[in-house]
Amino acid sequence: MEPRASSLNISQPALKVVDLKKSFDGRAVLKSISFEVYPGETLGIIGPSGCGKSTILKLVCGLLESDGGQIIKASEEIGLVFQGSALLNSLSVRENLRLALRNRKMSRREQDEQIEKTLRLVGLGDHIDHYPAELSGGQQKRTSFARAVVYNPPIILYDEPTTGLDPVMSTIIEDYMIELEKELHAASIVVTHQLSTWTRTADRVIMMHAGRIVWEGKPSDAMASDNAFIHQFAHASREGPMLQK
């Protein structure tokens, strides 16, 4: 795939979240969350289960409505990589990707060319006519990557992209994420628990706890930080504020 010449201004955020709030059944899940993501940057969002990470993604892509705050997007074109592959088993790999292009003003030949280029990018050029049941778990995950980016979206959201994968396949998926950042120059958010994923793929990280951002910085700074939250999370320690009542 040819590198994407981003139409977004690299000096301006592709995505800006300001004082975002969300509650469920009276319980505040997000409490005035604010951050920015720029073209060509990957932001990692980490933290314990239930802290609101995936809720942010659902709000950004419009699956949920916020209770307050703003989400300012430079584009409404957003690629979403689900935690599961979310492929349609009755459709081939080619047909699953074609769904993402169905509203594009492209001929069938142009669609096929774009699909083939994208599958080559994720190492699945020889699996274009296979069905999901014929693919391994890692191949299904890579197919979901290809479907999310086949139309070159300027914003990409990853929801736990390496969950359930063995260490080798996790590394392969992380490598593809790094390659996609270089190729597409998109503004990306990755929500993850996995240490290798956020340390390898994210340029910047925010850590959440109880609906708030409790630390922000570069992955390389996390291990040496004296912030109690990121220290406990990065070192997988039982001692720290996340276990306190």
Image: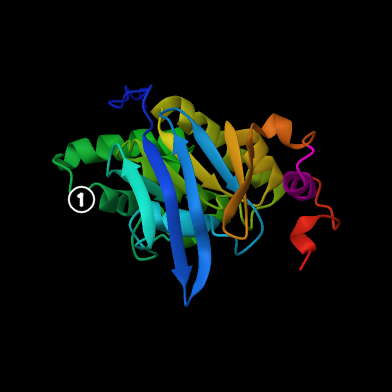
In the displayed structure, 64 sits above or below 191; it is below
The kind of residue tagged 1 is Arg
Magenta span contains residue 227: yes
In the displayed structure, 229 sits above or below 109; it is below
- Is residue 128 something that shows in the picture? no
User: In which image quadrant can residue 226 be found?
Assistant: top right
At horizontal 47% and vertical 72% (from top left) the residue drawn is 24
Magenta span contains residue 71: no
Judge left or right: residue 60 versus residue 220: left
Q: Residue furthest bottom?
A: 25
Front-lying residue, 15 or 162: 15
Judge left or right: residue 226 versus residue 161: right
Q: How busy is the neighbourhood of tag 1: few (under 14 within 10 Å), some, or many (20 plus)?
A: few
Quarter of the figure with the C terminus: bottom right
Residue 42 image point, x, y percent? 51, 35
Judge left or right: residue 78 versus residue 188: left
Residue under pointer 1: 102
The overriding secondary structure of the stretch rendered in magenta is: helix
Residue 158 image point, x, y percent? 49, 48
- Is residue 181 something that shows in the picture? yes
At horizontal 48% and vertical 41% (from top left) the residue drawn is 35
Label 1, secondary structure: give it.
loop
Residue 12 image point, x, y percent? 36, 27
- State the extent of the magenta-drawn residues as a range: 226-234
At horizontal 64% and vertical 46% (from top left) the residue drawn is 169
Quarter of the figure with the N terminus: top left
